[in-house]
Amino acid sequence: MHKQHILTIVFFIAALALTGQAAAAPDAVAALEKKVRSYTSFKADFVQTLTHRQSGTTETRQGSIIFRKPDSLRWETVHPSRELIVVTDSAVWNYIPDEEVAYKYPLDILKDSDTIMRFITGRANLDSDFEIEVEEEQGSTRIHLYPYHPQQTLTEAVLWVDTQSGELKKVAVTDFYGNENMLEFSDMQFDIESGTDSFRFSPPAGTDIEDRTSDKVMEKKLFQ
């Protein structure tokens, strides 16, 4: 599973899990919190832009996402290459069609004690884990998050929230090396009838399955 993918997914769900944080940034966070509480599911298209600081190159990916509370997720990249990440009720699957391989991880990876992984379960506390700064701009509010304990994969994150609707429009994550991972959303629809099939996965015939559900060092392999 690509580190850039999982970081963006985690921070996206982190924003969706914002509750009880209004004291840090009353208007912006409260608006996002209100929007989050108002729906049970959504789907959206995304454009992901990865900027590599050292080389100065950028990579763009396109796809779609379906999310259902509390943490069911279907993340599908369709361009320039296909990749699927599905959080089911029993495992986390990462399927790469071109390589005919599917990686299966236990749900325990979502319960890691690390600050980043705690976002997926909604147990992260922005007030205790981050310094928060809010900046208003035309039509939206930027929420800057600076971790009190920076990690190699996370030194800063920015959330763009629509001023009127309270919807999350964009997420950017910067790592220790200055590389940026930005995700922009469009055609967002709420309380959609996704059905349970969206959050199920059965590897197609002929797929090589890498089962890491009992791997004692699964975190190292997952993020390498």
Image (cartoon, grey):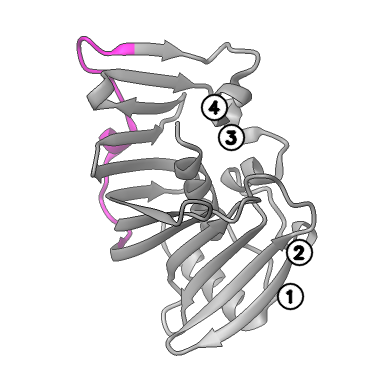
| Kind of residue at badge 1 | Ala
The answer to whether mark 1 and mark 3 are in CB contact below 8 A is no
Q: Nearer the viewer, residue 174 or 108?
A: 174
- Which image quadrant is residue 46 in? bottom left
| Kind of residue at badge 3 | Leu
The residue that mark 1 highlights is 23
Q: Which residues are magenta?
A: 189-208
Mark 1 to mark 2 CA distance (whole Å): 8 Å
**Picture disc at residue 12:** none
The answer to whether mark 3 and mark 4 are in CB contact below 8 A is no
Element under label 1? loop
Q: Earlier in the sequence, mark 4 or mark 2?
A: 2
Element under label 3? helix
Q: Label 1 crowding class (10 Å Cα cut-off): few <14, some 14-19, many 20+?
A: few
Element under label 2? helix
The residue that mark 3 highlights is 110
The residue that mark 4 highlights is 222
Mark 1 to mark 4 CA distance (whole Å): 35 Å
The residue that mark 2 highlights is 127
The answer to whether mark 1 and mark 4 are in CB contact below 8 A is no
Q: Nearer the viewer, residue 111 or 194?
A: 111
Q: Is residue 196 magenta?
A: yes
* Residue 53 visible in the current orientation: yes
Q: Earlier in the sequence, mark 1 or mark 3?
A: 1
Q: Nearer the viewer, mark 1 or mark 4?
A: 4
The answer to whether mark 1 and mark 2 are in CB contact below 8 A is yes
Percent x, y for residue 35?
Answer: 47, 70
| Kind of residue at badge 2 | Asp
Q: Is residue 195 left or right of residue 16?
A: left
Mark 3 to mark 4 CA distance (whole Å): 12 Å
